[in-house]
Image: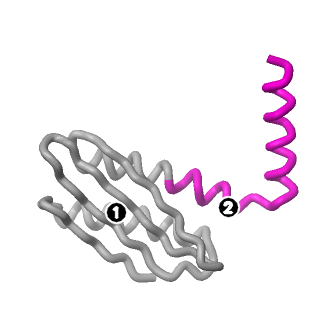
Amino acid sequence: MDVIFHAHHAVVTDRLRERAERSVERLASRLKRTVDAVVRFEEDGRTRRVEIVVHAPRHCRLVAEGQGRVFGAALADAISRLESQVLHRKRTPRSRARAAQLSSLTTARA
């Protein structure tokens, strides 16, 4: 799997790049046949933004974005959002339907 980095008006350290690459590869190993991932670092004033796009099988793209005052926090936020998407994709259709049914029952009781 290839990991492509883009930095828009941002200076990204090698350590942060390595951390992003390790995290993306760890999550991509849970998906089969992952093609590549694009990690974008953007800096706009005091806001730091990290966007991760993983090209998954069956032409699906998983997109996660994190914002923070520093790139480390923004990267951690984006990784956690991507992790929840990966866990959702790993569930079977039956378990997804069961979870949706349970959530509709709990909202109906409230």
Query: Is 7 positioned to the left or the right of 4 in the image?
Result: left
Q: Main secondary structure of the magenta part?
A: helix
Q: Disc 2 or 1, which lies upstream in sequence?
A: 1
Query: Is 90 positioned to the left or the right of 61 in the image?
Result: right
Residue 103 x/y as whole percent? 79, 35
Q: Secondary structure at mark 2?
A: helix
Real-space Cα distance between discs 2 and 1?
Answer: 21 Å
Asked whether 106 falls inside the magenta stretch, the response is: yes
| Residue plotted at (59% across, 78% down) | 59
Task: Provide the residue span drawn in magenta.
Answer: 82-110
Instruction: For the C terminus, give its image quadrant.
Output: top right
Residue at the outermost top position: 110
| CB-based contact (under 8 Å), mark 2 and mark 1 | no
Identified by mark 1, the residue type is Ala
Asked whether 90 falls inside the magenta stretch, the response is: yes
Identified by mark 2, the residue type is Arg
| Residue plotted at (48% across, 70% down) | 54
Q: Nearer the viewer, mark 2 or mark 1?
A: 2
Q: Which mark is residue 107?
A: none
Q: Nearer the viewer, residue 13 or 49?
A: 49
Q: Which residue is mark 1?
A: 20
Q: Which mark is residue 89?
A: 2
Residue 97 x/y as whole percent? 84, 50
At label 1, counting other C-alpha atoms closer than 10 Å, the crowd grade (few under 14, some 14-19, many 20 or more) is many
| Residue plotted at (87% across, 56% down) | 94
Query: Is 102 positioned to the left or the right of 84 in the image?
Result: right
Q: Secondary structure at mark 1?
A: helix
Residue 14 x/y as whole percent? 19, 66
Q: Considering only vertical position in the picture, is 100 above or below 54?
A: above
Residue 3 x/y as whole percent? 37, 76
| Residue plotted at (79% across, 26% down) | 107
